[in-house]
Image (spheres, grey):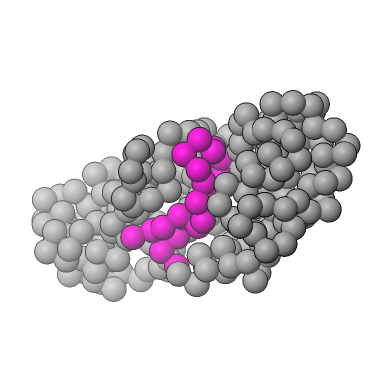
Amino acid sequence: MALERILQSQGFGTRKACRALVRAGRVAVAGVAAADPFAEFAVDGLVFQVDGGDWQYREKAYVMLNKPAGYECSRSPKHHPSVLELLPEPLRNRDVQPVGRLDEDTTGLLLFSDDGQFVHRLISPRHKVAKVYEVTAKHVVGADQVAALLAGVQLHDEPGPIAAAACTVVAERVVHLTLTEGKYHQVKRMLAAVGNRVEALRRIAVGPLQLPEDLAEGAWRWLEEADLAGL
């Protein structure tokens, strides 16, 4: 594939803009300065540099972010910055979208992709992909509340009870709650339905994919083949 097309496909601008990047000496391939925007390269495993930063060619973009509080999962946010601002411009140019949504005050694991089928599979209720939340409650979470969450609670405007797939107490006021649906404010509404209140909420897993302990809030990384295989 021609270098200008590679750069365009990876979110570095129009083909004209990518040609200009190469001719300005800002692009290297495998550490070797590139001068010809029309030079052909095999894309499998290709690593290139733009302004000194490494990029690996990826046909589709799959990334994870440790979302901090204070960001909206929207391209047109109303009250807070868009979570997309935490991603580098080339990824935004590729039109990656959040896989589901986290509330402005909810933190933790958030996935992004420009692969529509991948996004649909993870958010579709039909596939029942588990999402695990670390919930810090205002009051002690008693055994009766855990039992009610597992049995199912009635939420306003829902036709029937909504149950957690799992609920594990990890401290007096902290539980790990597993859901396979993504209804509006679901965790907060479920805790309220059992007479408690969410004080802090963090998503720690999507399916088998865990939020890495070494991924700082606001930081992102690529999903690798092993991650995708699990999902």
Residue in the image at 67% along x and 63% along y: 159
Is 108 covered by the magenta stretch?
yes
Left or right of 54 in this view: 17: left
**Residue 129 rendering spot, x and y as whole percentages:** 66, 61
In this view of the protein, can residue 200 be seen by the observer?
yes
**Residue 81 rendering spot, x and y as whole percentages:** 34, 39
**Residue 55 rendering spot, x and y as whole percentages:** 36, 52
Please tell me which residue lies in front, 201 or 138: 138
Residue in the image at 71% along x and 43% along y: 193
Left or right of 42 in this view: 228: right
Please tell me which residue lies in front, 76 or 115: 76
Left or right of 82 in this view: 115: right
Q: Quadrant of residue 14?
A: bottom left
Magenta span of residues: 95-115
Is 116 covered by the magenta stretch?
no
Identify the image quadrant of the C terminus: bottom right
Residue in the image at 37% along x and 68% along y: 43
Please tell me which residue lies in front, 62 or 18: 62
**Residue 1 rendering spot, x and y as whole percentages:** 29, 73
Residue 153 against residue 134 in the figure, above or below: below
Residue 51 against residue 158 in the figure, above or below: above
Q: Quadrant of residue 91?
A: bottom left
Left or right of 141 in this view: 120: left
Residue 42 against residue 167 in the figure, above or below: below
In this view of the protein, can residue 204 be seen by the observer?
no
Q: Quadrant of residue 87?
A: top left
Please tell me which residue lies in front, 120 or 230: 120
Residue in the image at 67% along x and 33% along y: 197
- Counting the numbered discs, the total is 0
